[in-house]
Amino acid sequence: MPKYREEVDALKPYEVGRRIEDAARELGLDPKSIVKLTANESPEGPFPGVVEAATAALVSSNRYPDNDLWELSNALAAELGVNRANLAFGNGTVALISDMLSAVGSTSSNVVYAWPSFVMYRFAAIWAGMDYVEVPLNDRFEFDLDALGAAVDANTRCVIVCNPNNPTGTIKSAAEIKHFIDDISEDVLVIVDEAYHDYVEDPRYQTVIPEAVERENLLVLRTFSKIYSLAAHRVGYALGHPETISVLRKMQQPMTVNTVGQAAALASLGQPDEVNRRSNANAAARHHLVGALAERGLTQAESHTNFIFFKMPGEDSRAVSDRFTELGVILRPIAGGWVRVTVGSPNENRTFVSALDHILAT
């Protein structure tokens, strides 16, 4: 039997969120009666014109995809007001994080990030052979920038800031993020993960893309998986200084985004009114769920995203999520009784509240 690295042997495969069909089969439920609110997916389908563009792209399935993503990269650069040299694309943001950590890491180095945050930061560190330092959130479930900065040492090669943070949905202001970046040594890469930026309404929040395209030690991550409803196609992208983007592209496998994904992402662009409509619809549904949780006396973090992090009675998050699944609602267990629910459609949200009331009553 081959000898594997000890840290890899200890890993468990990432749980992407239980499939409705699997839960229905195991519990003997009608799949149509189950709602999946675990993976922060959009409850709406792709943007207008996307299905047609993706279908048309299937005709060229016998050809490899465009490794340079020429059409998509030029269109996205124009929409964001950056140069094409400031962009790199990947098979979701996880692939981009993994590639960058492989570029900066070594067996004696570490990556620093808040906790709880996106668990794939831990996976990417292990894949790159790095140590990881997880800095606890503050009592408002926000990442503590002072503590993050204090955790950076001579072995730190990367700091990751998830803003808004997943799974808590909390944010830090643009001024706080910029001040934090200024205090980090220029030989340490800072990755700001903005996967959920489209959902934020708070005026304190702003992107750091303008800083990223000017600074070699700053990278911003975005995705088409969330508000653009293209989770199945795995199209993520990074924005940064051309030199940093050049290093990232050296570390990537070729043809990271397939032809259909490229076509779907390209067709999604140029529709700001649809982005705003979906953001507003999400905000209204989120406020409704926040109110429902508050009425029931449940502690929750201040969410600025398409999900809510809240505390159920007891400490067993897995048992809580299993109970919800039995009632036809799939949620994400975190730890210590904390769970995360994705903001869904009106019907999905009603189903969640009904299951919540049943569990609290019993």
Image: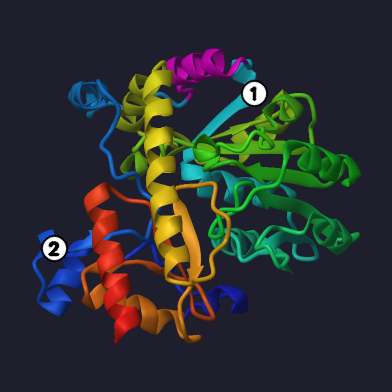
226 up-or-down from 273: above or below: below
- Name the residue at 29% across, 87% down: 362
Dot 1 or dot 2: first in sequence order is 2
- Name the residue at 49% across, 79% down: 337
Which label number is shown at residue 200?
Answer: none
Instruction: Examine the image and state in which quarter residue 342 appears.
Output: bottom left
Circle 1 residues within 10 Å: few <14, some 14–19, many ≥20: many
Residue 76 lies in magenta, yes or no? yes
Task: Work out whether residue 349 or residue 57 is closer to the camera in this orientation and state it.
Answer: 349
Closer to the observer: label 1 or label 2?
2
171 up-or-down from 259: above or below: below
- Work out whether residue 24 can be spotted: yes
Q: Which residue is mark 2?
A: 33
Kind of residue at badge 1: Asn
| x, y percent for residue 49 | 25, 20
Identify the magenta region. Answer: 68-81
Image coloring type: rainbow
- Name the residue at 36% across, 24% down: 274
Residue 87 lies in magenta, yes or no? no
| x, y percent for residue 356 | 32, 72
| x, y percent for residue 214 | 78, 24
Q: Which residue is mark 1?
A: 86
